[in-house]
Amino acid sequence: MTEKLLHILIRGWTATFRLPLLYSGTGLTSPAPPYSTLLGMIGCIAARDVKPNETRIGYYFRSDGTAIDLERTKRLQLKRKEITDKITKKKRIVETLVPNITKGDGISKRQFHVRPELHLYIDNLEFKRYFEHPENIPTMGRSQDVSWIEVVEEVECEKRESGIVSGTLLPFPTNGASGIILLLPDWFDNADTGYTRSIGKLRKYISVKSDVRAKVSLNNLYAVEKREELIYMHNLT
């Protein structure tokens, strides 16, 4: 049975998909973008908070390689201040992070993708208007990883039980797939105004690089016109 997906081709000069739980040393990038990053990109383009139940996401990602960049950082220090509560009249210590003026700026190393290419597939065809008239500039990771939309089109697809996949994230474990195993969020909850976002759901994935052809049997695999590899359509909920 033939179905339709929305295909969006996005290119950029650089891409950085920061690995979670890695906060010191050289900042490494994930070989493929997390689903939370792609959902956030869609929300940026649509200028609204896109919920995880609004669409499934599939993609193929490649780049011309990776490189290391130097990035200026701000050194912080913990500042303690004693304040008196206006109601209870009790004193307490408040700790805040402030720039460390004496030590000045620091330098860190950051890995990034060179000339990334993202083929994004979503099953909510109503989102086509967002990509044809984006409200904001899409980025692949950090704000300086500026990208642009080259193609927005509807494509036909058919479901498959098995086949070759490449350049994407697959659920762990998936027989036949090999790569870096990552624990990644599917989406973040930004509903509470004034509070930091919270993780909606965490799952383990295998990052299959674009130069690896993995033969897998998996639910939600689709043969898409104009693409040799199958596309895995991930349900975020």
Image (cartoon, rainbow, N blue to C red):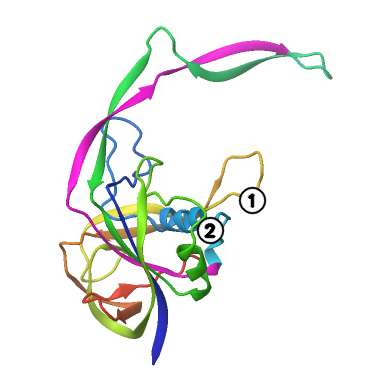
Image coordinates of residue 91 in percent, x first then y, are 73, 12
Q: CA distance from mark 1 to mark 2?
A: 17 Å
Q: How many numbered discs?
A: 2
Is residue 40 found left or right of 172 in the rendered image? Answer: right
Q: Residues within 10 Å of mark 1 (few under 14, many from 20)?
A: few
Q: Residue at x 55, y 47 (%)?
A: 198
Residue type highlighted by circle 1: Ala
Image coordinates of residue 119 in percent, x first then y, are 31, 65
Residue corresponding to mark 1: 191
Image quadrant occupied by the N terminus:
bottom left
* In magenta segment, residue 236: no
Q: Residue at x 17, y 49 (%)?
A: 65
Query: For residue 87, which quarter of the picture?
Result: top right
- Residue numbers of the magenta segment: 54-83
Residue farthest front in this picture: 133
Residue type highlighted by circle 2: Ala
Q: Are marks 1 and 2 in contact (CB under 8 Å)?
A: no
Compared with 22, 42 (above or below) is: below
Residue corresponding to mark 2: 46
Is residue 41 found left or right of 148 in the rendered image? Answer: right
Q: Earlier in the sequence, mark 1 or mark 2?
A: 2
